[in-house]
């Protein structure tokens, strides 16, 4: 993170990706998806738009056709549909004035535009990937590396796997069950009935009910309900969730040139999907890049775990004598098991946990 005149962090990003071999990819006239998390409004730990702009400018010199992208969220928030999602992106600096390329929401206006990609892996026979991402020729990920309350940490695999899934894909990863209606909360407004493409929701005594014979589990009712009466069933273990995320990442990258960048800075304890961010748990470490998303995530988690912890954070380091030898993500989220995702990713051929760390 040290800089000097003529060698700013933006300059160092370009030096890094060139040294990591990004020029091995032929970008000319290729639709290049830059998968990034735009940050939930109110959160300030997401990647700065300046970095995205620098990457886009570099890609334009290679005659690529780049666009920034993310898919809509499953949960309620400011990014559940393309209109609100783009508005949030623009507010956080990812707009045409700052970043010279379009913002395209991967799974469309209402989060139902996706391609079903066959992968025939142990947990997912197919993966439902946002159409704009599935149709891209090249995938580049820019990931804010941080903690995550369901997967231990959020790195490249999480950014690609969960982040590129359509709403139904996200529901498939999180749950083996279809949504439910909490009748006590339901107001009978009928929005879920109106927006259900499968005509699986109806009103009964002014309360929504789901016909599970017709329900396809797309999660659209969850997205449109303004009262949180339509709810997902979070019944997948964190181990299964991590493995499914790895399989979705496999689907996104399948048969496509890809390159990945982790920003190991402002390492917050939780996801950028929250409308706020807690204090960083370690000092800023730097930026890492690789063609191998598994090695990149493993190196990133090792660097965080090898770093001394900051004081006055969610880690509460006063309780620990040696914070440099602490598994910080398991300490923060003891019910998660981040290794499972990396192990499974390695097993299915997505990459290797073995790596050589080259400092630039």
Image (cartoon, helix red, strand yellow):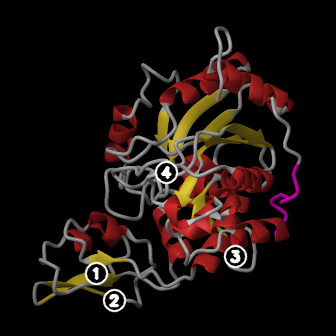
User: Residue 136: x percent and y percent?
Assistant: 65, 43
Please tell me whether residue 239 is drawn above or below residue 270 in the rendered image: below
Report the mark closest to the observer, 3 or 2: 3
Secondary-structure class at tag 4? loop
Q: CA distance from mark 2 to mark 1?
A: 6 Å
Q: What residue would you read off at disc 1?
A: 201
Could you say which quadrant of the image residue 66 lies in?
top right
Q: Which residue is located at x 63 percent, y 79 percent?
A: 240
Q: Nearer the viewer, residue 171 or 30?
A: 171
Please tell me whether residue 307 is drawn above or below residue 64 in the rendered image: below
Task: Identify the mark nearer the N-term, 2 or 4.
Answer: 2
Give the quarter of the figure containing the C terminus: top right
User: Residue 202: x percent and y percent?
Assistant: 23, 83
Task: Identify the mark nearer the N-term, 3 or 4.
Answer: 3
Q: CA distance from mark 2 to mark 4?
A: 51 Å
Q: Nearer the viewer, residue 16 or 96?
A: 16
| Magenta stretch encompasses residue 354 | yes
Q: Main secondary structure of the magenta part?
A: loop
Q: Which residue is located at x 36 percent, y 51 percent?
A: 79
Q: CA distance from mark 1 to mark 4?
A: 50 Å
Q: What residue would you read off at disc 3?
A: 125
Secondary-structure class at tag 3? loop
Number of on-image labels? 4
Report the mark closest to the observer, 1 or 4: 4
Please tell me whether residue 137 is drawn above or below residue 312 in the rendered image: above
């Amino acid at each position: 993170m040290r800089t000097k005149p003529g060698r700013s962090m933006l300059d160092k990003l370009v030096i890094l990706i060139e040294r990591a071999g990004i020029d091995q990819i032929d970008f000319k006239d290729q639709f290049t998806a830059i998968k990034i998390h735009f940050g939930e409004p109110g959160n300030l730990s997401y990647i700065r738009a300046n970095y995205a702009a620098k990457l886009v400018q570099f890609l334009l010199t290679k005659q690529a056709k780049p666009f920034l992208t993310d898919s809509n969220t499953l949960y309620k928030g400011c990014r559940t549909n393309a209109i609100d999602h783009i508005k949030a992106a623009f507010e956080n600096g990812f707009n045409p004035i700052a970043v010279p390329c379009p913002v395209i929401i991967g799974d469309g206006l209402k989060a139902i535009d996706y391609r079903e990609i066959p992968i025939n892996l142990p947990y997912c026979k197919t993966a439902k990937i946002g159409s704009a991402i599935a149709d891209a020729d090249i995938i580049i990920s820019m990931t804010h590396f941080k903690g995550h309350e369901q997967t231990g940490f959020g790195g490249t695999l999480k950014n690609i796997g969960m982040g590129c899934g359509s709403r139904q894909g996200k529901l498939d990863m999180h749950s083996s069950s279809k949504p439910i209606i909490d009748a006590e909360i339901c107001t009978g407004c009928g929005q879920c009935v109106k927006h259900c493409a499968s005509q699986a929701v109806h009103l009964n005594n002014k309360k929504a009910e789901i016909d599970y014979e017709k329900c396809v589990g797309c999660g659209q009712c969850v997205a449109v309900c303004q009262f949180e009466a339509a709810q997902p069933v979070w019944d997948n273990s964190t181990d299964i969730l991590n493995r499914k995320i790895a399989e979705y990442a496999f689907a996104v990258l399948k048969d496509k040139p890809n390159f990945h960048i982790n920003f190991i800075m402002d390492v917050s304890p939780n996801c950028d999907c929250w409308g706020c961010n807690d204090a960083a748990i370690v000092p800023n470490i730097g930026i890492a890049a690789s063609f191998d998303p598994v090695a990149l995530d493993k190196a990133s988690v090792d660097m965080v775990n090898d770093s001394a912890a900051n004081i006055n954070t969610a880690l509460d380091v006063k309780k620990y004598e040696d914070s440099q030898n602490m598994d910080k993500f398991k300490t923060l989220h003891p019910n998660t098991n981040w290794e499972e995702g990396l192990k499974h990713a390695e097993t299915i051929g997505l990459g290797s946990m073995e790596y050589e760390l080259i400092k630039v």
